[in-house]
Amino acid sequence: AQKFLDIKCRLSGLRPKCVVLVATIRSLKMNGGVAKIDLGAENVEALVRGAVNVQRHIENLKGYGLPVIVALNHFTGDTVAEVETIRGIVAAMGAELHVCRHWAEGGKGAEDLARAVIARLAKREDKFQLLYDDALPLLAKIEMTASCIYRAGGVEARPAIRAQLKRWEDAGFGRLPVCIAKTQYSFS
């Protein structure tokens, strides 16, 4: 989302009005430490631990001024307790959750989600804001992305890196957005 919002939207002029964040109980339990082979068993404690991932996503997206609707892709092994747990976590973050069963029910299984998105768009709110201003130096854009999105305590840049960033700025590229490579483990 960060790359789409800070790069694609900045350069194309797109202004999102809503975000649909897709999650699964299985992935959140795995993020909470459950082995793949054990994902079918109810484990509310692991779900709560793993929910930091969806919470971080919601926080980040709200930082862009965007309302968030969570689409919970439902698996047959998901229990009522797990669904209600994640529903509560999402609601506490100020987002809404819709259980989606489109894999089993086709389009009918995602109708509630579609109605929620349409209702949100009908409000015609436009609070979208970019993470940083184009005029910031490249290193400041990197620092802002690292701290605000990935919660880094700081950014270290060797003198050679600082010199390269300065050369790019001097060459007229300083107003461009930054793109930060990461691993899937750098987030939560």
Image: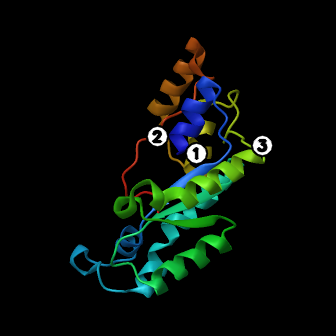
Q: How many marks?
A: 3
**Mark linked to residue 180:** 2
Task: From the viewer's side, name the closer residue of 138 and 109.
Answer: 109
Residue contact between numbered discs 2 and 1, judged by CB atoms under 8 Å: yes
Q: CA distance from mark 3 to mark 2?
A: 32 Å
User: What is the secondary structure assignment of the residue under circle 1?
Assistant: helix
Q: CA distance from mark 1 to mark 3?
A: 28 Å
Residue 95 seen from this side: yes
The image quarter containing residue 24 is bottom left
Q: Residue at x 29, y 80 (%)?
A: 40
Residue contact between numbered discs 3 and 2, judged by CB atoms under 8 Å: no
Along the horizontal axis of the image, is 125 left or right of 85? right
Q: Residue 132's spot in the image, x, y percent?
A: 68, 38
Task: From the viewer's side, name the closer residue of 106 and 29.
Answer: 106
Query: Which residue type does callout 2 highlight?
Result: Ile
The residue that label 1 is drawn on is 145
The residue that label 3 is drawn on is 124
Query: Which residue type does callout 1 highlight?
Result: Thr
Residue 149 seen from this side: no
User: What is the secondary structure assignment of the residue under circle 3?
Assistant: loop
Task: From the viewer's side, name the closer residue of 21 and 45.
Answer: 21
Q: Does residue 14 lie above or below 96 as drawn? A: above
Q: Residue 110's spot in the image, x, y percent?
A: 49, 58
